[in-house]
Image: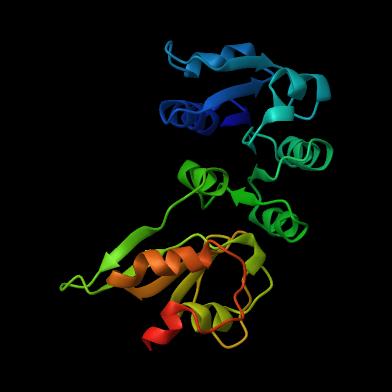
Amino acid sequence: MNYVIMGCGRVGSFLARTLEDTGHSVAIVDRDESAFRRLPSSFLGRRIVGVGFDRETLIAAGIEEAFAFAAVSSGDNSNILSARVARETYGVERVVARIYDPGRAEIYQRLGIPTVATVRWTADQVLRRIVPQESTAVHHDQSGTLAILEIPVHPAWIGHAYDELEQVTTSRVAYVSRLSTGILPRAGLVHQEGDIVHFVVESARRELIEALLSQGPHTDLTNPLAREH
């Protein structure tokens, strides 16, 4: 897949190396050519000198074919503007902007631009938002029967209550991470874009639950998971 990164600081260079090491093609943009010194000599991706909200710069970086765009420069305004251009002008669906001010990050999040407040989050959270993820085991009980799993949830679940996710999967939502803050589930709590959801599941049913959550909401509760109970 093709990725475009704006900002070749510590986070940007880390993302570029990580994505390339996992087989993706990467273009990285920075207004300061000397910033590319942070990249290893083995880096094969494109190095583009310019600003991330300039259309000619973005086109040179391959934004028209990009699977995802990450704006991780040192400027909040540049990052959010670049993210909006990538999404609204070039239709890149997977976009994330690094924001230093957590208060502003929350505002932009509500406007539909996924953000990472850098005072709390680090580069691995950026990767979670732009690279397709599989479920991750956070904890197993001693017998291995139960597990707490971080499971990606299909975007179609946005706006649906977590009670509905529990009903469809017949599992339990342990907690939700929202803007780097843990939230215990309560009646009526709704899934929002950017939420990281942790489920308590029976280990033997992991693949079935992953399959359900990889699709949109189900209204047919006669699925195999429901019949087990």
- Residue 157 x, y percent position in the rendering: 63, 68
| Residue sitting at the far left | 143
The residue shown at (42%, 79%) is 225
The residue shown at (59%, 75%) is 218
From the viewer's perspective, tell me whether residue 111 is left or right of residue 106: right
State which quarter of the image contains the C terminus.
bottom left
- Residue 177 x, y percent position in the rendering: 51, 65
Q: Quadrant of residue 75?
A: top right
State which quarter of the image contains the N terminus.
top right
The residue shown at (74%, 28%) is 64
Q: Is residue 163 visible?
A: yes
- Residue 190 x, y percent position in the rendering: 63, 76
Q: Quadrant of residue 203?
A: bottom left
From the viewer's perspective, tell me whether residue 58 is left or right of residue 216: right
- Residue 84 x, y percent position in the rendering: 78, 42
The relative height of residue 79 versus residue 200 in the rendered view (above or below) is above
Q: Quadrant of residue 200?
A: bottom left
The relative height of residue 193 versus residue 144 in the rendered view (above or below) is above
The relative height of residue 56 versus residue 4 in the rendered view (above or below) is above
Q: Is residue 172 visible?
A: no
Foreground residue, 119 or 184? 184
In the rendered picture of this protein, how many numbered marks are placed on residues? Answer: 0
